[in-house]
Amino acid sequence: MSKFNIKYLKPFKNIYVIVLVVFMVWMLFFDAHSWLFHHELNTDINELEYQKEHYRNEMAKDNKAIKELSTDEGIERTARETYYMKKSNEDIFIIEYEDSIPKNKQDE
């Protein structure tokens, strides 16, 4: 048993190995520029890049909607479809399907 301990502890008797191990532990966990700190920063960067791409897509959708609403036909279509507006001489019929009507507990 003592040969086993001596065999594996022999490299740790060297002062350079001890200094190297302490330095590596310090740099990985305790230093201001540690691996853990950089890992957190990298995850934050990835999350921010995802948000950046999401907002770019939202901006593209908004620009498309603005371009569509810049014409009179686009404004009229949006007013009719979204806000159910009509001209004075028109009638609007809103068709609801049976699946879209909420059921009361008495109806079930």
Image (spheres, grey):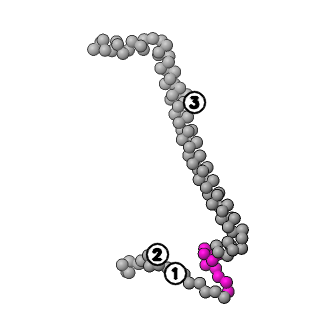
**Residue type (three-letter) at the residue carrying disc 1:** Ile
- The answer to which image quadrant residue 70 occupies is bottom right
Distance from label 2 to label 1 (Cα)?
10 Å
Quadrant in the picture for the N terminus: top left
Q: Is mark 1 on a helix, strand or loop?
A: loop
Q: Is there CB contact under 8 Å for labels 3 and 1?
A: no
> Which residue is at the front of the view, 3 or 76?
76
Residue 81 in the magenta stretch? The answer is yes
Name the residue at 44% across, 76% down: 99
Q: How many residues crowd around disc 1 within 10 Å: few (fewer than 14), some, or many (20 or more)?
A: few
Q: Is there CB contact under 8 Å for labels 2 and 1?
A: no
For mark 1, what is the residue?
95
For mark 2, what is the residue?
100
Q: How many residues crowd around disc 3 within 10 Å: few (fewer than 14), some, or many (20 or more)?
A: few
Is residue 51 shown above or below 108?
above
Residue 26 at x, y = what percent?
A: 51, 25
For mark 3, what is the residue?
33
Distance from label 3 to label 1 (Cα)?
63 Å
Name the mark nearer the viewer: 3 or 1: 1
Residue 37 at x, y = what percent?
A: 55, 34
Residue 19 at x, y = what percent?
A: 50, 16
Distance from label 2 to label 3 (Cα)?
57 Å
Q: Which residue of the protein is positioned furthest toward the bottom in this rendering?
A: 89
Give the magenta-colored segment's residue range.
79-88
Res. 45 in view: yes
Q: What element carries label 3?
A: loop
- The answer to which image quadrant residue 87 occupies is bottom right
Res. 102 in view: no
On residue 44, the disc is none
